[in-house]
Amino acid sequence: MKGATVHWQVQEVKQRFSEVLRAAEAGEPQIVTKHGAEVAVIIDIAEYRRLHGDHVGLMDYLRADPVDDVDLDAEIDRPRQPPRHIELAD
């Protein structure tokens, strides 16, 4: 993991949760303390999955619709020129 580890008291996390999440997403682990004792860590989901060993297969990934904002049915605009002739060495 990259970045510096930051410690937060529970009350601070409640008040500044968006900031804590942004830092975790940026690869900076965020440690939560309660009465001075470390009780939790907030890390990026990709790092969690790497540490936890969760592996998603290609079909499961595609079924989860990771590109739901991409129009896969849209026509691809490309040149309609015939392929060029390439001479290969003997």
Image: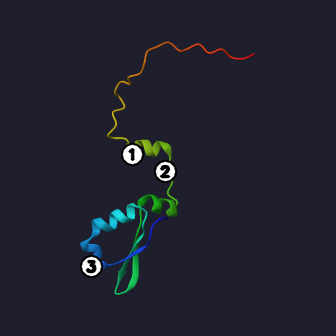
Q: Which residue lies under the disc numbered 2?
A: 56
Q: Secondary structure at mark 1?
A: loop
Amino acid type of the residue that numbered disc 2 sits on in the rendered structure: Val
Q: Amino acid at mark 3?
A: Gln
Vertical side of 47 occupied by 82: above or below = above
Element under disc 3: helix
Q: Which mark is residue 11?
A: 3
Q: Earlier in the sequence, mark 2 or mark 1?
A: 2
Circles 3 and 1: CB atoms closer than 8 Å: no
**Residue closest to the far bottom:** 35
For marks 3 and 1, give the one nearer the viewer. 3
The extreme left residue here reads: 15
At a point 49% along the width and 43% down the height, the residue shown is 58
Occupied quadrant, residue 35: bottom left
* Mark 3: few/some/many CA within 10 Å (<14, 14-19, 20+): few
x, y percent for residue 48: 46, 63
* Residue at mark 1: 64
